[in-house]
Amino acid sequence: MGVLLLILSPLIQWGERIYLLKTGQGVLFTEYVYNEMGDSIEVYQEMMRTLQSVVSLLAKIIAGAALIYGLLSLPKLREEWKNYLKAAAPLIVFAAYAAGIYLVTNIRGFTEFDAMPNYYMGDTIYEFMRHPFTYFFCGMLVLKGKWRKVLIIIFELSAMIMNVASMIDKWVVSNSCFTGLKDSAIFNNPNHYGYYLAIVVVCAALLFIYEDRAVFKTFHAANMALGMAAMISNGSLGPYVAVIFTLISFAVYCFKCERKRLKWVIIALGIIIAINLMMSMLVESLVSSMIRTVFDLGNIISDPSGSDDAGSGRWELWKQAVSDISRKPLLGWGIEGYEVGGTAHCEPLQYAVNFGIPVTVLHAAAIAVVMVETFIKKKKLSKMTLLCFCCTFSYIISAMFGVAIFYTTPFFYIFLGLTYAEVGKSFFLKEEKSDNSTPSEESGTILKKV
C-alpha cells in the first residue's frame, strides 16, 4: 500500500489541483484557495508529507508485526540470525546515515531549513532521515514477484496518463492544473519532471524488451516513445543521458547474459533515435545539447576557471559546492545553509554540502550494498528485479545532474527497495526459488500470472 501511494502521488496531486479549481477551497490535504505557482509548490509539499506520514505508519505497523513474529519464533531467529543480519544490511547502514545526520546537525547547530522546510525544496533533515525507513523499507518488503509486477504496471499506466496530459498541455491546450514552469507537468520544474521520466522511460523500455506478446510489446513501446517525447519536449539533458547510458549498459548485459534479448534493446534504442528525429522538427534536440556539452567539457579542461556557464551553469555550482565542502568537510552547512551559490545540482555534492563527507559516504554505502549485491546475483534474479535495478540505476545517473527534492527522491527509495526485495529474501529463504527467476535462455512473458 505504501509503495502504491507513492507511485500514484503525481496523479493524486493532479486530483487535488482539480478539486481546488472546482471548489476554491478545502482541497484534499490543504487549505490553499488559489492554484498558482507559489501555492502549488506548498500544496505538493504538504501532500507529500501527508503521504509520508501514512507510509511511515504502515512501515511501523509492519516493523512491529515483524518484531512480534521474531519474539514468537526465537528458536528460528537464533538459527537464522546471520542471514537476517545480512538481509538487513542496507537498513543498518541507512540507520548509521540517519544517525549521522542527526549528530552533525546537533554538533553544528540547526540552520534555518534543517527543521523547517524550505519554500521550494521542501525537505528538512527529518525527511532525509525518514526516507530509507519508509519508502525503501516498504519497497523491500514487496516479496512476491507478482505484486512487484502489478506495481510496475500501475506505475507505467499512471505515468502514461501524466505524459499524455503533459504533451497536450505543451502542444494542444494549456492545463490549468499544471502551474509550474512550462513542460513540467504536475511538477514545479522541468528538471524535476525529468527525474521522474528517467525512471518512467527505462521502466517502459525494460517491459518492452522482456514482453513476448505482440500486443503488450507494442503498448510498452508506445509508452517508452511517449515518455521519451515528453523528455525531449521537457529539455532535461541529465535524465536523457541517464536513460541512454542505462539502456546501453543493459545492452552490454544482454550481450553477455541474455543474447536473445539484445535485438530488442537495439530496437528500443532505435525507437528513441526515431523519436529524437521527429521531435527535432519541433524543439531543440537533446542530441544537440549533448554535443554542446562535449564542447563544454573541452572548455572546462582548457580553462576550468573561465567555464562557469558549462552544463547550463552546473560547472559553477559544482565548483562552489566543492569549495563549500572543503571548508566544512565533516559537519556540512545544513540544508540550504551555504553562504554562496545555490543547490549543487549533483546529489552526492548536495548531501556532502548539507551533511558533510562521512554522512554522504554512509548514504552511498547503503545504496552500494543494494546495487552491488543485486548485480552479483543478477543471473539468478527475476525480470522484475532486473527492471527495478535498471530504473534505480537510471535515477542514480540522473542524480549526478540533479537535486534531491521532496517529490522525486521518494521514487528512488521505492525502486531501490523493490530492487532489494528479492535479493534480501534470498538470504534467509535459500531453500526456495526466487520468484520468477529465469536463466538467460528462458522465454517469458512479463504479464504472465499477473
Image (tube, rainbow, N blue to C red):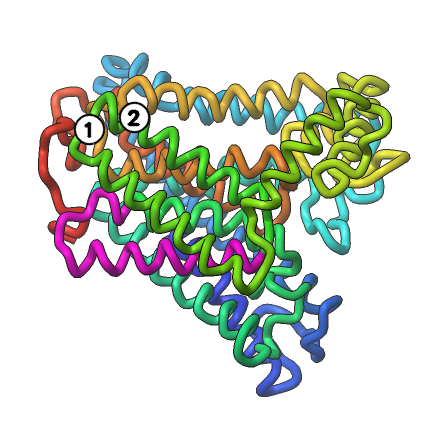
Q: Is residue 384 visible?
A: yes
Residue at numbered disc 2: 253
Please give the name of the residue rendered at 82% of the width and 29% of the height, measured from the top-left corner. 320
Label whose residue precedes the other's in the sequence (2 or 1): 2
Please give the name of the residue rendered at 53% of the width and 44% of the height, measured from the top-left corner. 239
User: How many other residues sit within 10 Å of disc 1, few (<14), some (14-19) or many (≥20)?
Assistant: some
Q: Position of residue 169 (x, y in %)?
A: 55, 73
Please give the name of the residue rendered at 53% of the width and 55% of the height, measured from the top-left corner. 232
Question: From which residue to which does the magenta span run?
Answer: 207-234
Q: Position of residue 240 (x, y in %)?
A: 51, 44
User: How many other residues sit within 10 Å of disc 2, few (<14), some (14-19) or many (≥20)?
Assistant: some
Q: Say if mark 2 contacts mark 1, CB within 8 Å.
A: yes
Residue type for callout 2: Tyr
Q: Position of residue 128 (x, y in %)?
A: 62, 38
147 on left or right of 138 = left
Residue at numbered disc 1: 258
Q: Quadrant of residue 87?
A: top left
Residue type for callout 1: Glu
Residue 208 in magenta? yes
Q: Nearer the viewer, residue 419 or 165?
A: 165
